[in-house]
Image: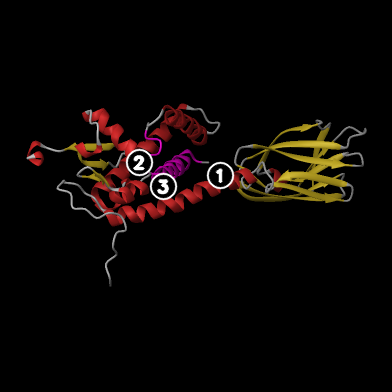
Amino acid sequence: MQRQQPTAEVIKPDLQIDEQLLLSEKGWVVQRVGWFFVIAVMIAGLLGAFGNGLLSKKNVSSGNVKAEYERFYRYETEMKVLVESSDHIASLSFPQQYLKNFRIIHFVPEPLNNSTANNEVTYNFLPSDNHVVSVYIISETYGPIGGTMKVNGTDNINLNHFIYP
Amino acid sequence: MNPVLRGIAVYVFLMIVFRIMGRRTLNNTTTFDLVLLLIISEVTQQGLVGEDFSVTTAAILICTLMGLDLVLTLLKQRFKSLDRVIEGTPLVIVDHGKPLVKRMKKTLLDDEDIMEAARMNFGFEKMSQIKYAVLEKDGSISIIPFSDKDKQ
């Protein structure tokens, strides 16, 4: 097999030095790939591949209900699930399996009370004209997390996140 | 996440990033580089401890980082090739007053970087006064002047 030749200048210095030109050249190639990777991560971050951006923002709707949430997010970071409806929002229900992965920080507006039935936690809101609810949650685990949120017990909204560590 | 795993992840990530960014990157060359280093350390600190500010976590993380460094040092001492891959090797960039342009281009160096080191260490005025300039593993530039024997 032909021995690989360096592309940079080959010299024989009268120095006691552990110069490995071929290894350095391989290192330069890896460096260039690394630079590409660093820039790619920066662009991906800008576009929202790790949350807070175009790629991450997910809009889903069911009946009169629209919801906006983050598809990608980061561990132990607060995110918002926005629920909007042309009808009054009387309750929001989340599966307990889903809530196991999150800590609910607060709702806007705050629910009047909550109850648990059929492995679901239901948050009830005041019986008045309420069309928008924001839920602020913090992920306590990482990896793929999914669940179906019910609005007023009828409209099902699928929430699917990928949480980075 | 377990603080030991956090420590390992951050240590390995920083090692890879600093290796691929090249030796001269953030080598305290400018005031801005220093500021950038301080910002990176602050960001790293937040990723390491998260919301856990206990003394125990700090102790675990310090032991993890020091332990990893110790293990890596022992491995590098045992396996010379690993040391060369992780730390790189010194590289001659000026040979008898002549800049080795291809090597300098690959390591993102220019004549001014070499002359700066030459001025600071020996008060040299010209590249021709340098016998060898070596880009060391830590990113610094060593200057070797011509000896009296060379001049004869």
User: What residue is pinned by disc 1?
Assistant: A42
Given the image, on which type of amino acid does mark 1 rest?
Met
Between B14 and B93, the residue placed more toward the observer is B93
Circles 2 and 3 on the same chain: yes
- Asked if one can make out residue A136 in the rendered structure from this viewpoint, the answer is yes
The label nearer to you, 1 versus 2, is: 2
In screen coordinates, is A156 left or right of B58? right
Residue occupying image coordinates x 49% and y 27%: B54
Q: Amino acid at mark 2?
A: Asp
- Give residue A58's position: percent from left, percent from top: 74, 48
The reply to whether label 1 and label 2 mark residues of one chain is no
Please tell me the numbered disc located at residue B110.
Answer: 2
On the question of residue A165 being in view, the answer is: no
User: Could you tell me which chain the residue with mark 3 belongs to?
Assistant: B
Q: Which residue is mark 3?
A: B20
Query: Which residue is rendered at x = 29% and y = 50% of the image?
Result: B84
Left or right position of A108 against B146: right
Disc with the residue nearer the chain's start (2 vs 3): 3
Give the residue type at disc 3: Ile
> Which label number is shown at residue A108?
none
| Tag 3–tag 1 contact (CB < 8 Å) | no
| Residue A39 drawn at (x, y percent) | 52, 47
| Nearer mark to the viewer, of 2 and 3 | 2
Label 2 marks a residue whose chain is: B
